[in-house]
Image (spheres, rainbow, N blue to C red):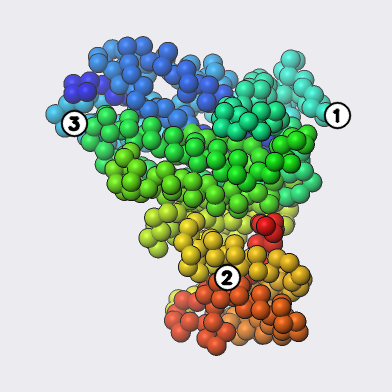
Amino acid sequence: MANSWLVMCDVDGVQAWLMRSVHLREIAGASQMLADFDDGLAKHARKGTVLFVGGGTALVGFEDEQPALDFCRAVPNALEQATVNATLSVSDPVLVGEGGFGAAMKKLVEDLERKKRVGQGRGEPLDFCHAVRCEGCALEPAVTAGTVKLGTDTRLLGAACLARHKARERTRWLDWMRGHCARWKNATPAADASALAGGANLALVLADVNGVGDRLAALGSVEAYKAFSKGLGAALREALVRSIAAEVPSEDLTKGSIPVEVLYAGGDDLLIACRGDLAMPLVSTLAAEFAARAGSDSTWTGGQPLGISFGVTITGGKFPFRVAHTIAAGLLRHAKRVARAEGWVEGAVDWAVVTETWGSSEAILADRVFETDSESLFLTGRPYRVSGQDARGLSSFRQACGDVAANFPRNKLYDLRRWCSAAQLRRDGADSPSEAKERLDDAILAFTRSVRRDPQTEYRWNTARSRLGLDESDYWAATTTSRTPLGDLADGLALWSPR
């Protein structure tokens, strides 16, 4: 495409826009509206070729500058008409000249990032203080036609949330499932978060493929870009479909509604809501399925395998949805940072089981480490590698959880988790990692004595500890950095049902 023009566009704050409503149905509907817009983007790119589109991001090529300029003017209005209130940042057209495709892409990304920093998107109109507010988002006035009913619940919605509500009827991800597996033919999505959780915990799983931006920046041609984007989309979708089909029990498909909902699947990102006990099995299987399609033998990866990382929040059914998403996003960033630092190409997963009525990823991460300038004590094994059989691998942790799942003194495990908290150790008078270790040693000794009363329980405990790389004779490594994953085992009882 030498001497052609490229334009890149991206929905502003797509995750925040998806989470604008507090209700599951409107969030799922927003995702469907975005998918519909992606599918219809070609009709707005007259005399152009859509090179990539997914999750609100698109790259379009044109032979002449004028059609490119027309597209830049038309596409933001088209998105607003399709979604009511989403905004779009669009780069200026960039000529693919002597510098080639790679140089043009660099200019596109820089221009788009600059425009996003400037903030060209319109803000929310909050000048309707005397109007009835939308009961979905409270960020717009309700409209007369916005009365909707779900079971015994009646809501009054604004124009944007009403459009989302109606769009929920089109569930593309369920079409993927029905095309893959006949037993999904009559599957019905849950009406709300409570129905999705089924009286149990609710989980949000946020996933992101590692290093996609760097990989795209290194591509040197339109053909390579198209091949990579197509391969990534196909691999992620196939992994998603197969993991859901494998981990959602058949009996759940015959009930009133299914315990999983794909809230967002675009580009290299996924957002899944599900019943709490399905979250980690989905993560484990999805990571394995993606690795099988994005390895070094896949032509679209160019011989360099890609990994995927996850942030997972597990809460009660009435925990604020937006807060749960914010926590998951923070945990995902942490997992990606650690995966990069540790060289885990396959990716990592971090999670939090939130039992309080509020929370933040910053507070959760801060409570996991007790440190000074010279020494650090990590009170968790998280994040874990999504593959691998070593002590930091998710598979080893899952097996350790299985060792302590049946006929084990769970209250003792919960006591151990309570001690694996920086706040708790400080309340108990610990002022340094060394003092924290002493108090943890007392808690671990009391726990070990209790499990030794029964030979089978002691055996399972020793097996679980061995899987996590813990040697009783030398529990704390003689280094300035120590780690104990024992408190994670209590979470494992909530994360995985015995199988």
Find residue 471 and report its horizontal and vertical position in percent.
54, 82
- Measured in 3D between alpha carbons, the distance from the residue under mark 3 to the one under mark 1, in whole angstroms, is 60 Å
Q: Which residue is mark 1?
A: 152
Q: What residue occupies the far front of the structure in this picture?
A: 182
Q: Which mark is residue 100?
A: 3
215 and 114: which one is in front?
215
Q: Assign the N terminus to one quadrant of the image.
A: top left
The amino acid at mark 1 is Thr
Q: Residues within 10 Å of mark 2 (few under 14, many from 20)?
A: many
Q: Residue at x 68, y 69 (%)?
A: 404
Q: Residue at x 74, y 32 (%)?
A: 191
Helix, strand or loop at mark 1:
loop
Residue 144's image quarter?
top right
Find residue 113 and report its horizontal and vertical position in percent.
37, 36
For discs 2 and 3, the disc positioned in front in the rendered view: 2
Q: Which residue is mark 2?
A: 485
23 w.r.t. 426: above or below: above
| Residue 40 visible (yes or no) | yes
Q: Earlier in the sequence, mark 2 or mark 3?
A: 3
Residue 159's image quarter?
top right
398 and 262: which one is in front?
398
The amino acid at mark 2 is Pro
Marks 2/3 in contact by CB < 8 Å: the verdict is: no
For discs 2 and 1, the disc positioned in front in the rendered view: 2
Marks 2/1 in contact by CB < 8 Å: the verdict is: no
Helix, strand or loop at mark 2:
loop
- Measured in 3D between alpha carbons, the distance from the residue under mark 2 to the one under mark 3, in whole angstroms, is 50 Å
Q: Earlier in the sequence, mark 3 or mark 1?
A: 3
Q: What residue occupies the far bottom of the structure in this picture?
A: 473
416 w.r.t. 341: above or below: below
Q: Residues within 10 Å of mark 3 (few under 14, many from 20)?
A: some
